[in-house]
Image (cartoon, grey):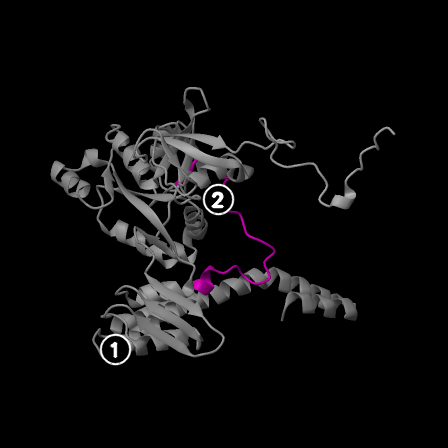
Amino acid sequence: MEVGIVCVIAHKADCDVCIVFSILCVLMLPVFNNMVKMGIVEKIKEIEAEMARTQKNKATEYHLGQLKAKIAKLRTQLLEPPKGSSGGGEGFEVTKFGHGRVALIGFPSVGKSTLLTMLTGTHSEAASYEFTTLTCIPGIIHYNDTKIQLLDLPGIIEGASEGKGRGRQVIAVSKSSDIVLMVLDASKSEGHRQILTKELEAVGLRLNKRPPQIYFKKKKTGGISFNSTLPLTHVDEKLCYQILHEYKIHNAEVLFREDATVDDLIDVIEGNRKYMKCIYVYNKIDVVGIDDVDRLARQPNSVVISCNLKLNLDRLLSRMWDEMGLVRVYTKPQGQQPDFSDPVVLSADRGGCTVEDFCNHIHRSLVKDVKYVLVWGTSARHYPQHCGLSHNLRDEDVVQIVKKKEKEEGGRGRFKSHSNAPARISDREKKAPLKT
């Protein structure tokens, strides 16, 4: 029974027993929500066990596709806020600051707090025991005339996507970041990287992947329209119909522009996935052999460092800068030297890197007054180049904005741009008669 209905019954009955019962319902509501979530977790485990028992072949691919769709639906329900809650609980969210945001994610005691202290100068308590950091600690990295916010998050454990160890709050903060630094211990097994990737994918994060080229649109009528621009090897029309029916979608348009998998189709249908860049940072390389360091350094999207000996931190900053794709644009007033002290920082993930985005970053009303811009830098074919609002800027370009000149009311120069004479002849003033 809902809390509001119980309170109304208690108010009408005016009975001490009803009042006590309503208070108990309010107190037991979080317990009921937790029981519902535990039921969802158990259903997910049962479906995963059934998938593990099922052999993968041509005859069972439709059944496995339906099971994957059911798991995706249950995990979406698991991430929804509980019913009857007045608001979100205590979280780790901090105000965005600077030109970019980077989140540190990893198991406890892998060196996240030490890395934050070395890169930003912000003190974050570090100790030899686990779970030293219990909340989000922000810091600012000053690199290449930009300010990058670095967040030290508490360590997550296996099962964080189900709420263990406040893992949901940690992952929610990482979703709001521009890039993720997954800090790993080089002296431990590779299984930690797989566990963290699995936990992040369970809540809708896709690391170092691009959105699948699948066009999907719901319709009111017309049934399901299935098309593809190339031969498909993982999904056919029957499997697509079964997955859509699992989501109770009977009218839609689906177009495959690439040979996508079943998981890609489910991600497009869910529509709540976020595709992020991730750098795997292997710390504590001073306690492993040179062969292991060389093997880890050659892996894709990986950087090896040592916070204890301060090794390779400059390479980490350079790799972070390249992955974030920040573009510094310097302004040049007319008749003056460029201002290289305070650049305008643009990003493809935060608005875009065109001249129009640059003008909007300065002021929203500046775009309508722009006549043309002069650009010096790697994006220009010659110096200076006359460009329009659609020109794409690159890092360390210099831009001079030429505004439209306002026309005076009476015109300019020797000739007026318009006449002040009345439009009709009858409205003209008659001249005074000549002397008689």
Q: Residue furthest front?
A: 436
Name which residue lies at 50% across and 47% down. Answer: 91
Name which residue lies at 30% across and 68% down. Answer: 262
Q: Quadrant of residue 109?
A: top left
Residue type at tag 1: Thr
Q: Residues within 10 Å of mark 1 (few under 14, many from 20)?
A: few
Secondary structure at badge 2 equals loop
Give the prevailing secondary structure in the magenta stretch.
loop
Residue type at tag 2: Phe
Can you give x and y, in whole percent of width and height, for residue 427 in the image?
78, 43
* Nearer the camera: disc 2 or disc 1: 1
Can you give x and y, in whole percent of width and height, for residue 199 in the image?
35, 55
Q: Quadrant of residue 350?
A: top left
Q: Nearer the viewer, residue 343 or 421?
A: 421
The image's mark for residue 92 is 2
- The C terminus - image quarter: top right
Residue 211 position (above or below residue 252): above
- Earlier in the chain: of badge 2 and badge 1, it is 1
Q: Residue furthest left?
A: 291
Can you give x and y, in whole percent of width and height, for residue 297 in the image?
19, 40
- The N terminus - image quarter: bottom right
Q: Which residue is mark 1?
A: 60
Residue 246 position (above or below residue 116): below
Would residue 256 be counted in the magenta stretch? no
Say left or right for 399 vs 238: right
**Cα distance, mark 2 to mark 1?**
43 Å
The boundaries of the magenta stretch are 76-102
Can you give x and y, in whole percent of width and height, for residue 283 in the image?
26, 37
Secondary structure at badge 1 equals loop
Would residue 97 be counted in the magenta stretch? yes
Q: Residue furthest top?
A: 336
